[in-house]
């Protein structure tokens, strides 16, 4: 979930060309990323050596990359003898059903029990302070804050900002940090990192999958993890009520050739009627986006506060990260999102207008 805003106030903002504007502000050279990695490791090692407590914060309602990255770093710090804990803002405070297999859950602490003024906070996969939810206030009270993220739209809200928009996942970046800390990758670390890797590469189907990604995957597999079980749980396991709801959501999908768009929506009443949670329908966008006749796919999901959480995907012709950033959200070039307090109709009208004005990317 990104910052909640009324999209009507943002509809007249210009959409930057690909490679320009705030959606690309997080891009950095390899040398700059290396310098920030060294700084992040230095701060973390200082906390370890001084016996300080470290709070690792995933974004609200975390996915596999955010929670996997936080747990992986937490396990590594525990190996070094550091008091590390992991938290995230979610109501209720429960691990998403698809991630209950993750090791290291004894590191988890609900927001109500985290220190009021932590020595060090490290945020994982959060593009802005708002993405931390209630824990954002805790993070600002920490003596030091390190931000580790791969979203180009990251607002650089930490004392040290390790941002690499070229990284396939935040878990890839966390692996580099763990290596620099001198911790060997064991089975549990590999499970957490691999979960983040398959989450953000779509099981190695997305464009961010590079030779380096496959080399890291091979390294993780060498620890003996059951990659098939991880992938099956993350991607291919659903309750029967999900299948019935999926049928309804696909049945109401709308194809708009004039906007090169396909979209559908899930009201909160649909969700509660099926006995499901928001995290259980995250995969709907991956089915909608397969529509051959549309470049852009959108799924609007309403939460308990009547806020529309909008997932947006592009096949490569439109920088939806730039579009969503202009509308108060953020993300990657071809996978992004935003949140809106407007009605569903107004939300989609504003998004359509932004998409119409968005420049097309070269093939």
Image: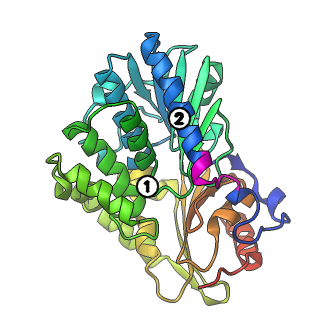
Residue 82 versus residue 199 in the image, above or below: above
Rendered-image quadrant of the C terminus: bottom right
Q: Earlier in the sequence, mark 1 or mark 2?
A: 2
Which one is in front in this view, the residue at disc 1 or the one at disc 2? 2
Residue 177 versus residue 302 in the image, above or below: above
Give the residue at x 26% y 62%.
236
**Circle 2: element type:** helix
Q: Is residue 311 visible?
A: no
Asked whether 166 or 74 is in front, the reply is 166
Q: Which residue is mark 1?
A: 271
Segment colored magenta:
25-32
Q: Is residue 337 visible?
A: yes
Q: Which residue occupies the extreme front position in the image?
A: 31
Q: Which residue occupies the extreme top position in the image?
A: 51
Asked whether 208 or 238 is in front, the reply is 208
Q: Is residue 12 left or right of residue 203?
A: right
Q: Is residue 362 left or right of residue 104?
A: right
Find residue 65 and report its horizontal and vertical position in percent: 41, 48
Number of residues whose C-alpha sits closer than 10 Å to that of mark 1, classed few (under 14), some (14–19) or many (20 or more):
many
Number of residues whose C-alpha sits closer than 10 Å to that of mark 2, classed few (under 14), some (14–19) or many (20 or more):
some
Q: Is residue 295 magenta?
A: no
């Amino acid at each position: 979930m990104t910052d909640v805003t009324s999209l009507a106030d943002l509809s007249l903002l210009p959409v930057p060309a690909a490679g320009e504007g705030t959606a690309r502000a997080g891009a950095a050279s390899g040398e700059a990323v290396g310098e920030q990695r060294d700084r992040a490791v230095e701060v973390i090692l200082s906390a370890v050596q001084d016996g300080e407590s470290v709070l690792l914060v995933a974004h609200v309602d975390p996915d596999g990359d955010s929670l996997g990255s936080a747990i992986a770093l937490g396990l590594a710090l525990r190996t070094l003898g550091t008091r590390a804990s992991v938290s995230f803002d979610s109501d209720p405070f429960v691990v998403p059903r698809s991630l209950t297999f993750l090791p290291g859950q004894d590191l988890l602490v609900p927001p109500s029990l985290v220190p009021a003024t932590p020595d060090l906070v490290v945020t994982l996969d959060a593009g802005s302070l708002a993405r931390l939810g209630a824990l954002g206030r805790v993070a600002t009270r920490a003596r030091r804050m390190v931000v580790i993220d791969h979203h180009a739209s990251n607002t650089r809200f930490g004392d040290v900002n390790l941002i690499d928009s070229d990284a396939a996942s935040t878990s890839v970046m966390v692996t580099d940090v763990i290596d620099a800390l001198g911790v060997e990758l064991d089975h549990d670390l590999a499970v957490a990192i691999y979960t983040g890797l398959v989450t953000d590469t779509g099981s190695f189907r997305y464009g961010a999958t590079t030779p380096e990604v496959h080399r890291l995957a091979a390294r993780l597999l060498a620890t003996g993890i059951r990659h098939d079980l991880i992938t099956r749980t993350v991607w291919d396991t659903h309750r029967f009520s999900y299948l019935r709801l999926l049928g309804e959501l696909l049945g109401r999908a709308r194809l708009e050739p004039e906007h090169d768009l396909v979209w559908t929506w899930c009201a909160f009443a649909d969700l509660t009627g099926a006995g499901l949670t928001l995290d259980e329908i995250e995969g709907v966008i991956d089915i909608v986006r397969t529509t051959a006749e549309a470049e852009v796919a959108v799924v609007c999901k309403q939460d308990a506060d009547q806020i529309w959480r909008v997932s947006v995907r592009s096949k490569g012709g439109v920088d939806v990260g730039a579009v969503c950033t202009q509308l108060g959200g953020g993300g990657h070039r071809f996978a992004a999102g935003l949140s809106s307090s407007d009605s569903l109709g107004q939300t989609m009208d504003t998004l359509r207008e932004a998409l119409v004005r968005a420049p097309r990317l070269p093939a």
